[in-house]
Image (tube, rainbow, N blue to C red):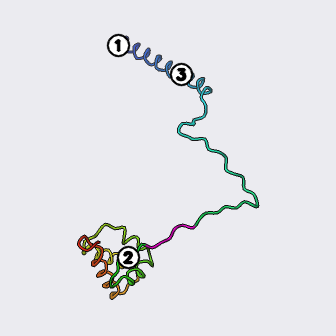
């Protein structure tokens, strides 16, 4: 390296060091002028103080079972399926093809371990196919 390149690198190094030191010093000075970060926060009132005679009440959660369609296998479907979930899961589904109902009942038994005997599973599947497919849904 020639003397010109060496002195240019030295000058650039000194200038970079000066910028860094100046920036750090400026940041330290300005740091004291910022308020704590409150962006995106909402002020909320303090919670009510609890006392020994405080009473909290909530109303009952509405629990109603959607009516399943009338037909053979309805009571078996309602009793077996409701052991794990509401019958609302049946009624809120879009109409499913018959093969899908076969798969659903199999999944409940094999994957999720629902204790549904073979005879009951056949009756439930037949009921679901009779009332909750695109061709049979009212």
The residue that disc 3 covers is 21
Mark nearer the viewer, 3 or 2: 2
Give residue 106's quadrant in the image.
Answer: bottom left
Distance CA(mark 3)–CA(mark 2): 76 Å
Among numbered discs 3 and 2, the one appearing first in the sequence: 3
Distance CA(mark 3)–CA(mark 1): 29 Å
The magenta stretch spans which residues?
A: 60-65
Is 110 magenta? The answer is no
Query: Which SS class for mark 2?
Result: loop
The circle on residue 2 is 1
The residue that disc 2 covers is 68
Q: Position of residue 58 (x, y in %)?
A: 61, 63
The residue closer to the viewer here, 2 or 94, is 94
The circle on residue 89 is none
Q: Which residue of the protein is positioned furthest toward the bottom in this rendering?
A: 119
Write the residue at 54% across / 67% down: 61
Is 61 magenta? The answer is yes
Predominant SS of the magenta segment = loop
The residue closer to the viewer here, 111 or 26, is 111
Among numbered discs 3 and 1, the one appearing first in the sequence: 1
Among numbered discs 1 and 2, the one appearing first in the sequence: 1
Query: Left of 40 or right of it: where is 121?
Result: left
Q: Is residue 31 above or below residue 51?
A: above
Give residue 25's quadrant in the image.
Answer: top right
Query: Which SS class for mark 1?
Result: loop
Q: Which residue of the protein is positioned furthest toward the top in this rendering?
A: 4
Query: Left of 104 or right of it: where is 28?
Result: right
């Amino acid at each position: 390296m020639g003397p010109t390149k060496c002195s240019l690198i030295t000058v650039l190094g000194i200038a970079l060091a000066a910028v860094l030191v100046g920036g750090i010093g400026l940041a330290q000075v300005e740091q004291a002028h910022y308020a704590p970060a409150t962006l995106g926060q909402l002020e909320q009132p303090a919670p009510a103080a609890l006392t020994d005679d405080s009473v909290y009440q909530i109303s009952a959660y509405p629990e109603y079972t959607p009516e399943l369609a009338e037909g053979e296998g309805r009571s078996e479907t309602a009793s077996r399926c409701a052991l794990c979930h509401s019958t609302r899961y049946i009624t809120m589904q879009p109409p499913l093809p018959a093969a899908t109902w076969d798969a659903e009942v199999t999944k409940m038994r094999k994957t999720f371990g629902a204790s549904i005997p073979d005879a009951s599973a056949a009756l439930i599947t037949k009921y679901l196919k009779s009332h909750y497919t695109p061709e049979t849904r009212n």
